[in-house]
Amino acid sequence: MSLVLNQPLKLLCFRRKPVLVRSSLMQTPPCSIVGVQPCGADHLGRLDVMMMSRRTCLEKKVPLELVHSDPMVMIGSSHGWVATLKDDGILRLQDDLNPAASDMNPKRIPLPPLVTLPHCQTQIVTNVSMSSSSPEDEDCVVAVKFLGPQLSFCRPAQRKPEWINVRIANPCFYSSRVMYSEKDDMFRIPGSGGHLIGSWDLGTHMHTPKIQKLRFKKFPNLAKTTRKLLDSCCTSEHLVESRSTGGEMFLVKWYKRTSEIVNGVAKMGTEALMVFKLDEQGNAVYTQDIGDLCMYLSKSEPFCVPASSFPGLPSNQVIIYDFDEAGFFFLDNLRFIGGNSTFRAPFHIPPPNMNN
């Protein structure tokens, strides 16, 4: 994979931080953002969340335009910070939808104007990822993956933050999502189909990202009809890192297909999930047992937590929140229990101390 920079190379060196798990402090469970309920206040509404399968309308008030207005578009979420992109081309990070953040003094951090590389676009964003829990941290790097070849990085806390823009040559990464691996101190992107993983070590290897080829092991034997069904699905690949188990890395293949058409718009539904445990040698071993872990897939950066730290949270499951559906995927028997959703902001917020 060759990369083209639109400016001289500027190294964004990361400082490695040990993963510290404090299970005794894990009292706030992950929550899912459902939307905002109008409450009579001017341009404000109460934050509507789902926590431990219970839907609650909090007292916290957030701007209605964050969810209901066209000029502001939510393009992703990482560590509880929502990224928005307005018509002015300015990407902003804000903590309005984080239940643990203050509604009296919300933080909105504008990033520099986006720079579009030749033969690229910066209007459609695949997702956003951050290397730490807050963009105000000195070492925090924000990665933005655009649909197509462009991948951009920025360190917001710098005195004069600038974008480092990379053009990816291999088309298999064009529609994929970026994630940050704390264990490897790299941003990583799975290729379409899951056979390749690109890793960007911004300290030393920006020009030559590490490309890892995966070898799938113990791939399930599928009936011919099942294979045909999965072949007809829209498939996306997601990398999920388990910080509570020393940085175990999983590749999740998410199979979706049209469940219904409403007013000419196709609504997608989950048909299947496959989870593969990855090792440093590039082996991807199919598994239906992730132990005590519970994974979260949504429009946010995927993550997983130890279920035993949150009484009532199911283990060995994947919790899904999307614009069209929400539900639980049971890995032991490969069953999905869920249904249509009308979530305006299908984002998952990890526990605050998960990032320590």
Image: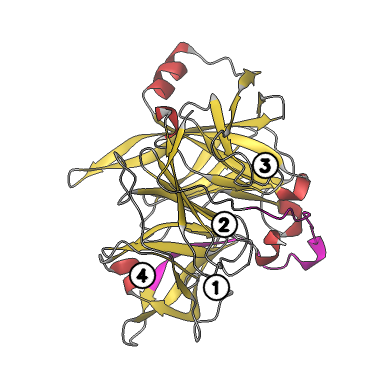
Asked whether the residues under the numbered discs 1 and 3 touch, taking CB atoms below 8 Å apart as contact, a structural biologist would say no
Percent across and percent down for residue 186 are 63, 44
* Residue 316 - label: 3
- Horizontal side, residue 213 vs residue 263: left or right: right
* Badge nearest the viewer, 1 or 3: 1
- Which segment did they paint magenta? 13-36
* Residue 351 - label: none
User: What is the spatial separation of the Cα atoms under label 1 and label 4, in whole angstroms?
Assistant: 15 Å
Q: From the image, tell me which residue sits under label 4.
A: 66
User: What is the spatial separation of the Cα atoms under label 1 and label 3, in whole angstroms?
Assistant: 26 Å
Kindly state the secondary structure of the residue where label 3 is placed: loop
Kindly state the secondary structure of the residue where label 1 is placed: loop
Asked if the magenta segment contains residue 27, the reply would be yes
Asked whether the residues under the numbered discs 1 and 2 touch, taking CB atoms below 8 Å apart as contact, a structural biologist would say no
Indicate which disc, 1 or 2, sits on the residue closer to the N terminus. 1
Three-letter residue code for mark 2: Val
Three-letter residue code for mark 1: Pro
Asked whether the residues under the numbered discs 1 and 4 touch, taking CB atoms below 8 Å apart as contact, a structural biologist would say no
Viewer-proximal residue, 319 or 150? 150
Indicate which disc, 2 or 3, sits on the residue closer to the N terminus. 2
Marker count (numbered): 4
Q: From the image, tell me which residue sits under label 2.
A: 141
| Chief secondary structure of the magenta portion | loop
Indicate which disc, 1 or 3, sits on the residue closer to the N terminus. 1
- Horizontal side, residue 99 vs residue 182: left or right: left
In which quarter of the view is residue 346 placed?
Answer: bottom left
User: What is the spatial separation of the Cα atoms under label 4 and label 2, in whole angstroms?
Assistant: 24 Å
Kindly state the secondary structure of the residue where label 2 is placed: loop
Percent across and percent down for residue 10 are 54, 51
Q: Residue at x 36, y 23 (%)?
A: 232
Q: Is residue 12 above or below residue 63?
A: above
